[in-house]
Amino acid sequence: MVGNRIVVVCTANMIRSPFIAGLLRSRMQAFAGRGLEVDSAGTAARPGAGAAPEAIELGKTYGLDLAAHRTRRLDDGVLATGDTVLCAERAHRRVVLDLRPDLLSSVFTVREFAHLVARVPERDAAGDWDGLVRAAGRARLGGRVTPEADDDVTDPIGCSQEVWTAFERQATQAVSAILAAIGSLPPEEWTDTSPPRPPATRRENRMRLGAPSSRRAARTG
């Protein structure tokens, strides 16, 4: 049985996983009827460190406050039965499965999961998050429709602005696809009890379209 917890995994838990987890967490507030818990961890994280400065700056562009984030190392104590694990790279997926082979059917890369939920016909019949994750697993068994390289989210640490822009685009597009799949679930499972939201800002429209921001992320070596 798939639970209501998502764990986003990258290497150091300083850029990719906190940014993606932050986007998912903040955008899923609209689905208040059945909230999903979103956490993050890193396969080689140094516990207690902060997010990378450039990730903090990029997060601000999307209304995220990553300044309080503290890194956490992935181990078998972090993961629980029923977790859905969304990894930045295929290499992280292998680490997760070495720790928790019982999670085989609910471990994906972030972009892989986004591709799967965007195309599975079973999604229309899914009544909840459990059904959506299971439908993605069935679609994966049906064979690939995208190259394996498209499953990974680029690691931008120490790279040029061009690479940071690619990372931002990959992350936001994947999150947008996942949110669209969640939004397709039956309304009774996702009753929105929040007050009406004001019209979308330019930043929100940019997020929805998966377009990179114009803000230049700071670069470090």
Image (cartoon, helix red, strand yellow):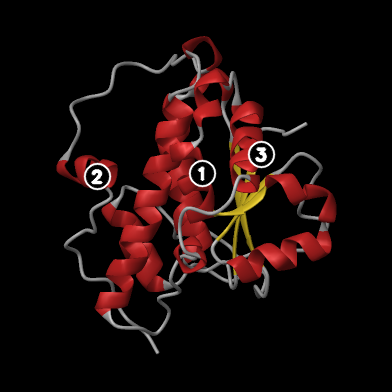
Q: Earlier in the sequence, mark 2 or mark 1?
A: 1
- Indicate the position of residue 28 as horizontal and vertical percent values: 46, 33
- The answer to whether residue 64 is visible is no
Residue 89's disc is none
Q: Secondary structure at mark 1?
A: helix
Nearest to the eye among marks 2 and 1: give it. Answer: 1
Residue under numbered circle 2: 209
Residue visible at 64% across and 67% down in the picture: 92
Give the position of the C terminus as an image quadrant.
Answer: bottom left
| Rendered location of residue 107, percent (x, y) | 67, 51
- Rendered location of residue 202, percent (x, y): 15, 43
Residue found 61% across the figure and 47% down from its top:
140
Query: Which amino acid type is shown beneath numbered disc 1?
Result: Leu
Which is nearer the N-term, disc 2 or disc 3? 3
Vertical arrangement, residue 165 with respect to residue 169, above or below:
below
* Residue identified by numbered label 3: 5
Q: Which mark is residue 116?
A: 1
Q: Quadrant location of the N terminus?
A: top right
Q: Position of residue 75 (x, y in %)?
A: 78, 63
Please, what is the three-letter code of the amino acid marked with disc 2?
Leu
Above or below 174: residue 178: above
Is residue 104 something one can see in this rendering?
A: yes
